[in-house]
Amino acid sequence: QVQLVESGGGLVQPGGSLRLSCAASGSIFVIYDMGWYRQAPGKQRELVATITRRDTTNYADSVKGRFTISRDNAKNTVYLQMNSLKPEDTAVYYCNADVMVQVTTRRGDYWGQGTQVTVSS
């Protein structure tokens, strides 16, 4: 019913920047909170940043001041601008959205397939 598709990952040198995008599509009535999570090899998935429909943001301490989350409600898209990247930012980044679908108005949590971010020289 709802699909999330991430893009923008890749290989970048320490200190570099990347911008991730996540577009939601399908039987969407309204999208509430959106967010980015990441999972490094051998570690649990962790929150990176979230944003409410009214643009209230929340960040993990490890990315504060370096990453910026934003969204375009008209495009059902959330972004993550990542600056001053460090090797410890290497992970698969997942998009998440809290969505109310059309017709049934059921509300659920949806995830993208993930995009790899590698920070290495």
Image: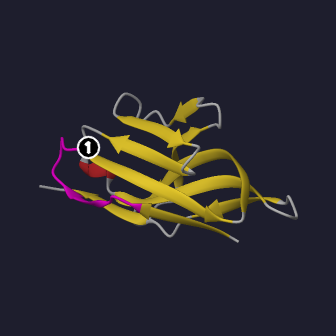
Is residue 107 covered in magenta? no
Q: In which quadrant of the rendered image does the N terminus lie?
A: bottom right
The residue lying at 34 percent from left, 33 percent from top is: 66
Residue 61, horizontal then vertical, whole percent: 46, 33
| Above or below 16: residue 112 | below
Q: In front: 86, or 23?
A: 23
Residue 81, horizontal then vertical, whole percent: 36, 41
Mark 1 residue element: loop
Give the residue pinned by disc 1: 85
* Residue occupying the far right of the picture: 104
Query: Residue 24 appears in which quarter of the rendering?
Result: bottom right
Residue 3, horizontal then vertical, whole percent: 60, 68
Mark 1 Cα shell of 10 Å, populated few (<14), some (14-19), many (≥20): many
Report the magenta stretch's main SS.
loop
Q: In which quadrant of the rendered image does the C terminus lie?
A: bottom left
Query: As drawn, is 37 to the left or to the right of 100?
Result: left
Is residue 16 covered in magenta? yes
